[in-house]
Image: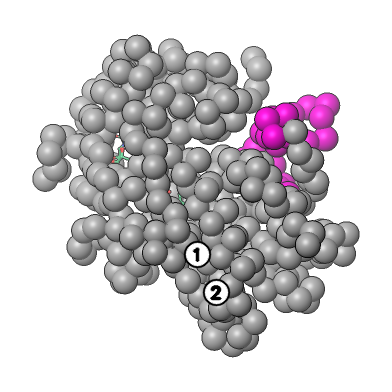
Amino acid sequence: MAPPTVLVTGGAGYIGSHTVLEMLNAGYNVICVDNLCNAYSGGASKLPEALSRVQEITGKKIHFYRVDITDREQVRSVFQEHKIDMVAHFAALKAVGESCRIPLQYYHNNMTGTNVLLEAMADNNVFKFVYSSSATVYGEPKFLPVTEEHPTGNCTSPYGKTKYFTEEILKDLCKSDKRWAVVSLRYFNPVGAHISGRIGEDPNGEPNNLMPYIAQVAVGRRPKLSVYGSDFPTKDGTGVRDYIHIVDLAEGHVKALDKLRNIAETGFFAYNLGTGVGCSVLELVHAFERASGQKVTYELVDRRSGDVATCYADAKLAEQALGWKATRGIDKMCEDTWRWQSQNPNGYAQK
Ligand SMILES: NC(=O)c1ccc[n+]([C@@H]2O[C@H](COP(=O)([O-])OP(=O)(O)OC[C@H]3O[C@@H](n4cnc5c(N)ncnc54)[C@H](O)[C@@H]3O)[C@@H](O)[C@H]2O)c1
Ligand SMILES: CC(=O)N[C@H]1[C@@H](OP(=O)(O)OP(=O)(O)OC[C@H]2O[C@@H](n3ccc(=O)[nH]c3=O)[C@H](O)[C@@H]2O)O[C@H](CO)[C@H](O)[C@@H]1O
């Protein structure tokens, strides 16, 4: 039987590129679309730089189209060109602070983009869908660890709401038509890089998230890290999160695709992708110093608005239903981030 073909949206991004690599290694054919609004184009090569490196690592071919998923005609033309079996949907705008400043762009890109994609799927009889959701759908945790039964929807930012609203749309869609099989993966805090050091996280401008900030301080691109809050009710007063290695996360997607491919069951399924282990900001800083041999200068400052003290996953359901479990710990996350950051101090742009 021919291997299934998966359309990957946002495949040139951080999580998309790592997942494409694992999908190729698992034998899937991959068609990527991305509008490159948050990915490095790679100049002369027709492929975005991250995907060109994925091809180099795997020795396998990726079909790439520069497509904006809000553009109905562009999306339809990809379905006309290829016989698609499943879709993994990563494309989204994802900066929490920016989404509060330009909410309409976030709603258009993330919600309209998803609707256009789902309509094109239905028109082409494709009903298997893996969605990039987030722990942000849970809002402030009412209990820990956070299970999939935790209420969703109490999101504080337009970005978070696009993830929650999209899950609601997907649930309605599955109720309306029993052919749909949807897996929504709720990521906790993805960090790290592929072991090759060739692909990794390359944020535009000043990083919003902790791990890329630490890495840029360690490599000398930024003078110091601001630690947001040291008076939380946690082990050392700093925020506690569930960091998950990007390759574990990518493997979780392959397991989700395997499930959709092999099981006739349809409907909406949500799974947490996390480790179940909470790590504080200062623990991560010290682990990074050990892994890199570099000093990470930091300053304790006020809390960042909207931040919760502690959030970590109960990831048992993904283990039971998908046969997936995160295996890489904090030291490995730091070691792999450092290899990527030190070998590519300016990310994909070789300045
Ligand atoms: N990184 C995280 O910490 C995190 C956590 C939870 C959920 N997520 C979700 O995972 C997904 C991937 O995140 P990421 O960290 O890889 O982000 P990313 O920005 O690196 O990747 C997203 C990709 O989508 C592309 N894109 C955006 N809008 C598009 C559009 N309209 N048409 C085509 N391409 C478009 C961007 O150019 C980019 O390459 C997103 O849906 C994000 O919301 C990320
Ligand atoms: C409110 C918010 O933005 N939430 C997003 C952020 O979650 P998080 O806020 O969980 O991730 P993060 O990496 O921005 O922060 C992790 C921890 O580090 C702390 N910290 C972060 C940066 C920094 O420069 N200094 C510092 O101390 C922060 O207070 C928190 O305790 O990222 C996630 C992806 O990984 C999701 O996209 C969340 O929606």
Q: Secondary structure at mark 2?
A: helix
Which quadrant: the C terminus? top right
Q: Is residue 100 left or right of residue 79?
A: left
Label located before the other in sequence (2 or 1): 2
Q: Position of residue 184 (x, y in %)?
A: 50, 64
Q: Is residue 161 above or below residue 101?
A: below
Q: Is residue 61 above or below residue 276?
A: above
* Pair 2/1: label in front: 1
Tell me if residue 240 is in the magenta stretch: no
Amino acid at dot 2: Leu
Q: Is residue 205 left or right of residue 40?
A: left
Q: Position of residue 64 (x, y in %)?
A: 79, 45
From the viewer's side, name the closer residue of 345 and 330: 330
Tell me if residue 48 is in the magenta stretch: yes
Q: Secondary structure at mark 1?
A: strand
Amino acid at dot 1: Ser
Distance, label 2 to label 1, CA atoms, is 9 Å
Q: Which residue is mark 1?
A: 184
Q: Position of residue 314 (x, y in %)?
A: 29, 58
Residue at image point 57% right, 53% down: 254
Which quadrant: the N terminus? bottom right
Q: From which residue to which does the magenta span run? A: 32-58
Residue at image point 34% right, 57% down: 315
Q: Which mark is residue 80?
A: none
Q: Is residue 316 left or right of residue 347?
A: left
Q: Position of residue 329 (x, y in %)?
A: 34, 36
Q: Is residue 18 left or right of residue 333?
A: right
Q: Are marks 2 and 1 in contact (CB under 8 Å)?
A: yes
Report which quarter residue 88 is drawn in: bottom right
Q: Which residue is mark 2?
A: 170
